[in-house]
Amino acid sequence: MSDSETAEYDVIIVGAGFAGVHQLLKIRKLGLTAKILETGEDLSGTWLWNKYPGARVDSPMPIYQFSDPAIWQDWSFTEYYPDWREIQAYFRYVDHKFNVKQDVSFSSRVISAHWNDSVDRWTVTTEDGRVFRGQFLSLCTGIASKYHIPEFKGIASFKGEVHHTARWPEEYDFKGKRVGVIGTGSTGVQVIQEIAPIVSHLTVFQRTPNLALPMKQRKISVEEQDKLKKELYPIFYGRRNQTFSGFLHDLDPKPMAETTLEERTLAFEDRWDKGGFHFWLGSYSELFLVQKYNDEAYAFWRRKVRERIPDPELQEKLAPMQAPHPFGVKRPSLEQRYFEVYSQSNVTLVNISKTPIEQITRNGLQTNDGTEHVLDVLVFATGFDMVTGGITSIDIRGQDGVSIKEKWADGVRSYLGVASATYPNMFWIYGPQSPSSFSNGPSSIELTSEWIIDCIKFIKENNISSIVPTEEAQHAYSEHVNQLGSIGLWAGAKTSWYLGNNIQGKKTQMLQFPGGIPAYAKLCNDSAARGYDGFDLK
Ligand code: N01
């Protein structure tokens, strides 16, 4: 295709991670045409960019993969929680099997998507000026595609290396270097525990302690997986759609008032021993509703963590007597040896909630008590403009010509966490007001992707040219999400990307659907069953 030509497709997909690849394979099955436009140079989405040491999934196998037997029957992972290398290898395998790449245009950053009401088509433009047209636009940009570096005074003066974890320099050797890491979210935890043994000195700047849970990583054999494939995989993938979070374990709805302290403590022990998110989304649902029960879970967590930290001062920094926020209102990180790392003689933990960062200097970082921490490398594990950033960084304009960035400046609004009023034939997956991070990624990705495919099929079969949410339906749905987010303790973290307030100026609101996968699926399926209730069809 030459630069001046416009390529026509039924569906333009943005992003080649789990969501984009799932959409493509399903659209092919409908006999329609699709093109994925992908900024990077390979498949795998977030796993293409987040290649820092220790980057790995926090959903155990086998549920963190496509549910299609044609895919899982010939593939085995080596670890219960695979790392980015293995996920990339998995995508290479999927490509080998289905020739995914023939329908992907790599190095194609989408900068704009404009709706043309007279022809009911999207015109999509890439950074290098190529133009694509599609009846449908499927945004599969993920929740973490726009990384964030806070504005610190003096950053340009630093003479060492500066890196954000989402752009990890593979070629750089950290061995023997004095490294500073700002941020102790999931990324921080993973990178800190991995590089601590190899650097000469590691200084961690922590604002909020991470209420991380033990991952309990283990190897998994081909034989073990083959046995499960024969007996249980289809059951697992069916079950994924039935639990609150798309994992195989579920929240326990039993009223905690009807339990004894002994019963609860044994239940906590059991979940703790199982590892991963059992202690979070496999525990009592009332933990997220009633402060005194949440306090009990926190006290249990604190005791377990403190047992691993000999120094009382470090105990208080990492697992303080007073919880930094209700346990579990942020997705906990899964750690492997995180809490032991701080007892190493080459690791310093700086509590920047007490002595905030004053400025970055030529030689390192200065906190407001006047201490200068001398560094060779400064790593920002400071997160992302999560959930909305991937969508709002594209100039998307719908029926009224107003960009979605402007529309969402005073808060995200959507219908069913999949579409937005005035943007016809546009859908997103794993984005605003969908269950996204309250769930196992592929569980909610496949759920939404299937719904979109059914919707496209319905439109094509019924000679409809466009579908767009009504303002009324959008208002009601968005209010529902806000209301769910205000229940219990969900909004209890002071800074959290779940609420958008990790980014200055971003409206504080619950960005994801916190009502669980079955409730979410019911809302989506009910609308479809009623002929796409809440949408205008033309
Ligand atoms: O980002 P985060 P992340 N000054 O926003 C700190 C997914 N993920 O990249 O907590 C000082 O969670 C900030 O401090 P505080 C997963 O969904 C998954 O770690 O706001 N510090 C925090 O410590 C995850 O939730 C995996 O007080 C500042 C950190 O930076 C999401 O990605 C692995 C600061 C940011 O934490 C994001 O995780 C990794 C400032 N100005 C990521 N600004 C898996 O395991 C921010 N911080 C699959």
Image (spheres, rainbow, N blue to C red):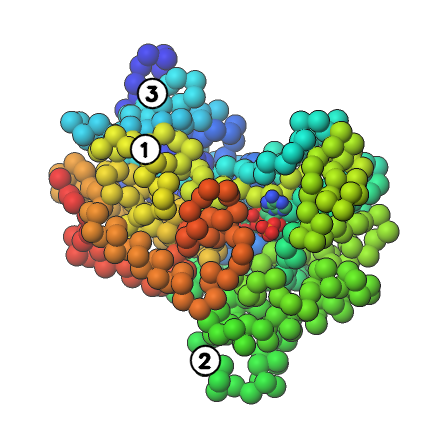
Task: State the image coordinates of residue 374 (x, y, percent, origin top left).
Answer: 80, 37
Quarter holding the C terminus?
top left
Q: CA distance from mark 1 to mark 2?
A: 46 Å
Q: Are marks 2 and 3 in contact (CB under 8 Å)?
A: no
Q: Residue furthest right?
A: 345
Q: Comparing marks 3 and 1, which lies closer to the viewer?
A: 1
Counting residues from the N terminus, which is met first, the one under dot 3 or under dot 1? Answer: 3
Quadrant assignment, res 373: top right
Counting residues from the N terminus, which is met first, the one under dot 2 or under dot 3? Answer: 3
Within-10-Å neighbours for mark 1: few <14, some 14–19, many 20+? many
Q: Residue at x 67, y 27 (%)?
A: 156
Q: Residue at x 42, y 33 (%)?
A: 393
Residue 330, placed above or below residue 53: below
Residue topped by disc 3: 131
Q: Secondary structure at mark 3?
A: strand
Quadrant assignment, res 529: bottom left
Q: What is the three-letter code of the residue carrying label 2?
A: Lys
Q: Is mark 1 within 8 Å of ligand 1?
A: no
Is residue 160 among the parts visible in the rendering? no
Q: Comparing marks 1 and 2, which lies closer to the viewer?
A: 1
Task: State the image coordinates of residue 164 (x, y, percent, origin top left).
Answer: 63, 36
Q: What is the three-letter code of the residue carrying label 3?
A: Val
**In screen coordinates, is 335 left or right of 290?**
right
Task: State the image coordinates of residue 510 (x, y, percent, origin top left).
Answer: 42, 54
Residue topped by disc 1: 403
Q: Secondary structure at mark 2?
A: loop
Task: State the image coordinates of residue 136 (x, y, percent, origin top left).
Answer: 27, 35
Residue topped by disc 2: 254
425 or 347, which is in the foreground?
Answer: 347
